[in-house]
Each structure stands twice: as C-alpha cells, then as structure tokens.
Image (spheres, rainbow, N blue to C red):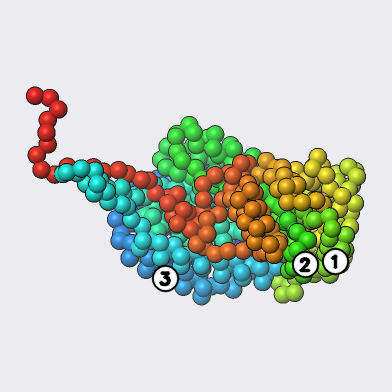
Amino acid sequence: MSAITADVRTYGHLIGGEEKPVEQLIDRVSPGTGQLVARFADGTVADAQQAIAAARAAFDDGPWRHTTGAERSRILLDLAAAIRERREQLALLDAEEVGKPIHLARGDIDGTIGHFEYAAALAQQLHGDVHTNLGPNYTGLTMREPVGVAGLIVPWNFPALIYSQKVPYALAAGCAVVVKPSEFTSSTAIEMTRLAAEVGVPAGVINVVTGYGMPVGQTLVDSPDVDFVSFTGSTATGQRVATGAAKTTKRVSLELGGKGATIVFEDADLDDAIDGALFAVFFNTGQCCVSGSRLLVQESIADEFLARLTRRAKELHVGPPTDEDARLGALIHEQHAEKVLGLIESAKQEGATLLTGGRRLEGELSDGVFVEPTIIDGVRPDMRVFREEIFGPVLCAIRFRDAEEAIALANDTTYGLANAVWTKNIDTAMRLSHALRSGTVWVNTTIDGGPQLPIGGVKGSGYGREAGQAGLEEFTELKGCLIHTGKRVPYYG
C-alpha cells in the first residue's frame, strides 16, 4: 500500500510488479480544499524505459498473451469485484485530486467497474474469421492478435474512468501496457494496478510511471519497443503524439478536445432539455471533452428557455469534494481558472451578454479553485468562446432559425467529438444524427451511454475508438493466413 504520512499519500512507480522508490516527488494540492493530499514520483526517461522493458518482457516472454480468453475474463471480473470493494476509497482519491464532488467520483468508479466487466465479456469473444469460398484446397483465415506493448496516456479529468476505457480492453486483447497517468491525479491508477496484481495479473503486464508528459509520455511515444499509443488529452498535445509516433511507424488512438453543441428545437420537452443543457455543460464542472458548451436554441423559444435555464443555473450548489450536495466542484488548478475567466472576459469584450456567473468564488470556497456556473448569451460564431474549448463551467448561447442553420452552426468547428439534439420529431432526430459531424450524437439525453458504445471523434477531436467492440479491436492486429491443402500445381515447370 502507499506510504501515508500526516494523511499525505506518497507513491513510487509500479514497474515489473514492484514499487520503485524515488527521490524526486510532485506535490498534489487538492484544488477543492487547498490541502496537500498526495506526492507522486517525478518520472524520468530512465523510469519510462525501465517500464517499457518490463512490459516488453512480459509480452514477449510472459504467459499473458497465451492465456485463454476465459482465464483473462475471469481475472478481469475478479479485478472489477476488487474495485467494487474499494469503491468509496477510490472515489475519494479522485474527488480530492480532481476537486470534483464525491457523488460524481462514485459514479466514475461505477463506470470503471462497468468497463472492466464488459471487457471481461469481450475477452471470451475475440476471434477471427474463416473463408471457405476461395477455391478448391484453400482455406483463408483472419486472426486477431494482440498489438503488443501499449502506452496508455490518461488525463486528469476522469482518472479512474479513462484508465478503465483503456487498460481492461488492452488486457482482454492480450497486451502488456505502460500507463502514464496525469501528474495531478495519479492515485487511482496506482491503486487499481495494485489490485490487478492481487487478483492474478502477471508482473509487468501493467506498469505505471507517474510524472510529466515531457519526458515520460514522450518516451512512450518515441520508443520503438512500444507498438501502440492510446492518448486522451488536448488536441495540440495529440497532434504532437501523432507526429512523434510516425517516427517509429506505430499506430495511435487519439481522443482529443471537443466543442459540443446542445441543440434544442421548439418541439422539445423543455423541462428535459433544460436539465440536459445544465448537465451537458456543468457536469464535472465543465471539465469534460464531450461537454455541450455551445447551446443552440431555436429562436421561437430562446428567450423563455434562457430565462428558465439561468434561474436554474443560479441555484446550482458549488462545493468542495466531500460536500454530498455539491453539483459543481473545483477547476483543476489556478492557471486553468485564469484561462477560463479570461475567455469569459473576452466574450464580454466582444459584445456578448453575461446572464449569470463569470466570477471566481471566494468566501468559504476561497481555499479552492472555484468559478461560478456561467451562461453567456448573444454569442456569435466569430467569438473565441464559440470556437475555443473552454473546459470549464461556461455555456455559450446562440439562436438558430431552422434545422439547416442548426446543423451549420453545430458543424462550424474544428472539433467533432459529441453533440446532443433535443426534439420530439423523429424526422429531425434522424436527420441531425446523420448530419452532425461528431463521433457521438445523443438524442433527448446527453453525456450518457455504456461500455458497449464506442467513444471517439472526428476532425480535430482525433481518431480511433475507446470502449465497445471497436475499443477492444484497437489493441489488436489483423493477420491474414491462407492454407493450401493437397498437391499444389506449380507455376514453373
């Protein structure tokens, strides 16, 4: 277990089944309380290389890739059960380090368990195909094999959940992995990896190296001994990952930024749509890549909808991680809060109207990093708040006339991760589901789903998929095999 001194967790790297003591540490102060809660190893190039070597040996020479699907499934189910037993502790770790309300962190752990359980089911279903129509004496096979060593780079906003969108699918496919969690939120990655060892995942199959993207993440991207990189984070960093990976011709999966739209038509159930619009942008304090940070509302209902939405936003309770009633928590750190407040200010200077919020919260919350739930009206497509990912509790409203204009506004972005449509008209729902350029479209719901559904984007939101059958297949290579039986007719002679 982690070393605990005066309630401060201290962690080393997990490499080859052992925890490595280190001297250089990164302090993590909770953005929700201002208190020091954890210290993580400040990883080096040598640390990352050692972890890659451990994963390489575990994959090339260890038993995991040759373990049956049934055995992998059993171990993944045992790991899901172990995580369930530690649900409250793991939730508290994420709540403290991210600054999110504890009830949201519990939901993240529940989702984490779901991914492990679903990946366990997929482990028994991974198979190839047989082709028997290639002619006499020929049988064609397609075989799915593990891609090898995978570097998994996990962001800070959903530390346990996004770990679970990568690790169990990699294990179900038979891979070995090196996990690089965020330097802000590393505890649950380490604790769940320890649990994996307890339930029988062989040493070296899961390794965790904490620290900064440069040098740890960069080493994973550059190493020729890493066969595949799965990255979740900003579009700018994802572009650097793709460029770096090209030097060793390794595949990458990129789940990047978003600028999602919540599109509300006049025939929608307005009560549901208001709930959805609030949840879409204020869930996880807006620090969510699939956040619906742009509200597109039909002109005929816009004034009423925004008035009701603003009243509801003013009633939302903001609080520290252990506040059971809080619906919004802290922003990840001071620099991020400054960025969010700067974007709000830019909207005001460009002529938009602030309906509510827009300020740093002080008083009882002054020890943390809290910004009020914010709604901005009169936004135009040329404004920064319409075009840039804010990643905070800020909703930008713009009116539209008809479906054609709604589609054009929603697609007027370099991103393409997720959008939500609120309508009771099935024709409108289906039309927009096809027309919106994003990896996910929700209809009459938002930020919703299950481990069966793939997660990923288009355009600047990346490529590749996590979760679902597609998420498992990302960690495989497809091999063709042609078998000839009987006597072969020679080409020559």
Indicate left or right for 434 with 478 as reference.
Answer: right
Q: Tag count in the figure?
A: 3
Residue 270, which numbered label?
Answer: 2
Residue 152, which numbered label?
Answer: none
Verify CB contact (< 8 Å) between mark 1 and mark 3. no
Residue 308, which numbered label?
Answer: 1
Residue ID at (66%, 44%): 415
- Badge 1 marks a residue whose secondary structure is helix
- Badge 2 marks a residue whose secondary structure is helix
Residue 463, by quadrant, is top right
Quarter of the image with the C terminus is: top left
Nearest to N terminus: mark 1 or mark 2: 2
Q: Nearer the viewer, residue 162 or 478?
A: 478
Residue ID at (61%, 69%): 107
Verify CB contact (< 8 Å) between mark 1 and mark 2. yes
| Distance Cα–Cα, label 3 vs label 2 | 44 Å
User: Which amino acid type corresponds to the residue marked 3 in the rendered image?
Assistant: Asp
Query: Which x, y percent locates residue 8?
Result: 63, 64
Residue pushed farthest top? 493
Nearest to N terminus: mark 3 or mark 2: 3
User: Which amino acid type corresponds to the residue marked 1 in the rendered image?
Assistant: Arg
Q: Which residue is mark 3?
A: 78
Query: Which x, y percent locates residue 192?
Result: 50, 64
Mark 1 residue crowding within 10 angstroms, few (<14) / some (14–19) / many (20+): some
